[in-house]
Amino acid sequence: MNKRLSYLFLCASGLLSAASDWLPTFDDKPVAPSQIKAIEDALPHEAIVAPEVSRRILVFSATAGYRHGSIPSGRLAIEKMGISSGAYVAVVSDDFKHFEKEALSEFDAVVLNNTSRDFFMPHRKQRKEFEGKEWRWLQERNDRLVDNLVEFVENGGGLVGIHAASDACYDHPDFGAVIGGFFDGHPWRSRNNVTLVVEDPEHAINKPVFEAMKDFQIQEEIYQFRSEPYSREKLRILLHLDPKRSDAVEGMKREDNDYPVAWVQSVGKGRVFYTSLGHNDHIFANPLLLKHFLAGIQFAAGDLDADTTPSAQLN
């Protein structure tokens, strides 16, 4: 009996009703009126480049681990930025149906907005709510949807990862390779002041955003990444943190002192942009950083042509 028939049999038997009906729900706080105004005041009013065709992106924010309080601000900012700039139309949804192959093909890019852990699964605290067969069905669905996302990118789709998108899907090496790195702690926490270096000022994603800026200071939680799969041999690094000009912290693990913040890469026929910015609410009301997100989205969607030669090959 193939998997499809097994699934139908189990559903008909009533064994998977709880699992097959399960979708996540989240009790997010609404965006405060003052934050809405701050986001609206910060929005770019033109695209980085004119879109070649009408672009459609999916903004997905489901979590099975830590849920960031900035998720509602991120959703709102990305949706409104598409309207204000004319660069894209955003579908803001946490419905898993969008990750079935046929549904994914309707999008130019997927934005993972602070997704965490196995984001197609219930939180581990909910596991006791499901019997063994139900949990296995959920796991099989999770694996299939992650595989669909990877295949979507490899076949020419775009992927944007924001902050906790790298704190996800650790049991899926292909996902790690596509997103570019796995989270390994945040020595710089939300109230730390950090200096970020514009590593590649002439890059097509950086230049229209940062112009002549060589660096800038913000207050933000900044990640470090595991030694694998992160590599400058694979990624084009756009921004990195300068430890010497940032708050002194404990917990820095990398002997090479390499703390990237944003990068791009080509994966098969597709395009990936990742930035670890997005923990704090104010990031989504910063005009400079909204343009940073916009440039990344337009690259991933296929309108902004940018070099993805790995940084290690430039030296």
Image: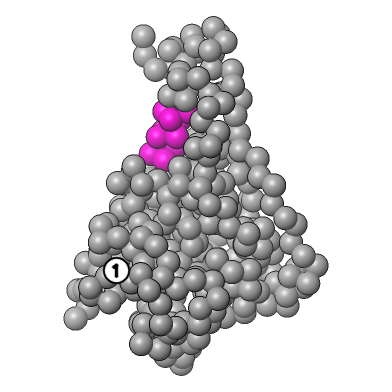
Question: For the C terminus, which image quadrant?
Answer: bottom left
Task: Using the image as rendered, state which of residue 224 and residue 99 is in the foreground.
Answer: 224
**Image quadrant where residue 205 sits:** bottom left
Residues 306 and 281: in front is 281
Q: Which residue is mark 1?
A: 253
Q: Residue at x 63, y 50 (%)?
A: 91
Would you place residue 258 above or below residue 247 in this image? above
Q: Is residue 267 above or below residue 149?
A: below
Horizontal and vertical percent position of residue 236: 31, 70
Furthest-right residue in this view: 33
Residue span colored magenta: 137-148
Q: From the viewer's perspective, tell me whether residue 315 is left or right of residue 88.
A: left
Residue situated in front as seen by the camera: 41 or 230: 230
Q: Residues within 10 Å of mark 1 (few under 14, many from 20)?
A: some
Q: Is residue 239 visible?
A: no
Q: Give residue 252's position: percent from left, percent from top.
A: 33, 72
- Asked whether, in this view, residue 266 is left or right of residue 167, the answer is left
Give the vertical position of 78 relative to 127 (above or below): below
Q: Quadrant of the N terminus?
A: top left
Residue 199 drawn in magenta:
no
In percent of the image, x 42 and y 50: which residue is there? Answer: 168
Q: Is residue 98 above or below residue 213?
A: above
Q: Residue at x 20, y 74 (%)?
A: 313
The amino acid pointed to by label 1 is Lys
Helix, strand or loop under label 1? loop
Residue at the spot x=22%, y=78% of the render? Answer: 314
